[in-house]
Image (cartoon, rainbow, N blue to C red):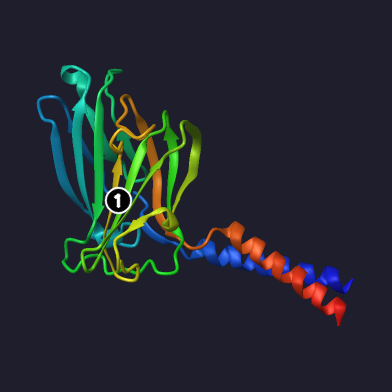
């Protein structure tokens, strides 16, 4: 009975830890705010804009997005159009219009136009989570962090091939998988950048693809995954039970 009670205590502790972790994320972008849209086509291969929404700084880190979209090829005329858009609730990355095979690469950078960068700490966090609502094919994403001293940390990851759930599916990239410049400081982040349809120098599956439609719900920096907290708390309870039994 005592062992059972101790294990229950371990489970309760793990659940409390999970709730704490869920509430401890740092929101980079919840894609709320006014509508913004950028289009590119063969005649205008690049477009960029600063999307300012300081009134929703709580759901858009720094209050600004620097958005760039590059046309990479495919499609003809109006059918070669590609788009990145935010409708006030989700973010759309649409790399084909009119059913053609156009390719594009989009970049969103968060660095606060007010000066001084983001000035946020990601120390003690485990990685970046992107909520994917829809994706009709997998594509490569590059994540880049720059600290206050200009040091960089980068990672490239591949989204799930197909997501058609209508609700956000977490796409997680751990900081342990990033490549860090020597002396990089996670406690003083100047900017964060996300590149979709990234070209990773011809690596398998990590190259720009055509005819992509992707919808995102959020981008967050999160604490340690809940599964690790559950395992740790469970093992703690088990060890404590065995120790008391042997006394």
The answer to whether 240 appears left or right of 173 in the picture is right
**Residue 9 shows in this picture:** no
Q: Is residue 162 above or below residue 85?
A: above
The answer to whether 92 appears left or right of 128 in the picture is left
Q: Is residue 67 above or below residue 162?
A: below
Query: Measured from the top left, where is residue 90 in percent x and y?
Result: 36, 43
Query: Measured from the top left, where is residue 32 in percent x and y?
Result: 34, 50
Q: Quadrant of residue 175?
A: bottom left
Quarter placement of the C terminus: bottom right
Query: Measured from the top left, where is residue 18 in percent x and y?
Result: 59, 63
The answer to whether 236 appears left or right of 39 in the picture is right
Residue beneath the point at 15% across and 43% down: 48
Element marked by disc 1: loop
Q: Quadrant of residue 242?
A: bottom right
Question: Mark 1 highlights which residue?
Answer: 33
Residue beneath the point at 28% across and 36% down: 201
Residue beneath the point at 34% across and 62% down: 58
**Residue 124 shows in this picture:** yes
* Dot 1 alpha-carbon crowd within 10 angstroms: few under 14, some 14 to 19, many 20 or more: many
Q: Residue furthest right?
A: 1
Quarter placement of the N terminus: bottom right
Number of residue marks: 1
Q: Residue furthest left?
A: 43
Q: Is residue 151 above or below residue 172?
A: below
Q: Quadrant of residue 122?
A: bottom left
| Front in this rendered view, residue 237 or 217 | 237
Query: Measured from the top left, where is residue 5 in percent x and y?
Result: 82, 71
């Amino acid at each position: 009975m005592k062992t059972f009670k101790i294990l229950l205590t371990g489970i309760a502790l793990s659940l409390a830890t999970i709730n704490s972790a869920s509430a401890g994320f740092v929101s980079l972008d919840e894609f709320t705010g006014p509508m913004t849209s950028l289009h590119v086509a063969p005649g205008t291969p690049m477009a960029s804009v600063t999307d300012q929404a300081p009134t929703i700084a709580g759901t858009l880190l720094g209050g600004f997005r620097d958005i760039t979209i590059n046309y990479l090829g495919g499609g003809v005329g109006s059918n070669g159009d590609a788009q990145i858009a935010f409708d006030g609730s989700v973010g759309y990355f649409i790399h084909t219009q009119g059913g053609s095979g156009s390719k594009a690469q989009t970049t969103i950078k968060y660095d606060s136009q007010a000066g001084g960068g983001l000035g946020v700490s990601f120390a003690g966090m485990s990685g970046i989570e992107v909520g994917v609502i829809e994706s009709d094919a997998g594509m490569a994403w590059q994540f880049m962090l720059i600290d206050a001293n200009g040091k960089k940390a980068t990672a490239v990851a591949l989204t799930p091939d197909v997501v058609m759930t209508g609700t956000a599916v977490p796409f997680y990239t751990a900081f342990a998988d990033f490549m860090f410049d020597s002396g990089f400081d996670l406690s003083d982040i100047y900017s964060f950048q996300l590149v979709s349809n990234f070209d990773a120098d011809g690596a398998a599956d990590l190259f720009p693809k055509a005819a992509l439609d992707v919808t995102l719900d959020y981008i967050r920096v999160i604490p340690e995954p809940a599964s690790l907290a559950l395992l740790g708390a469970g093992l703690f309870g088990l060890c404590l039970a065995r120790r008391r039994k042997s006394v």
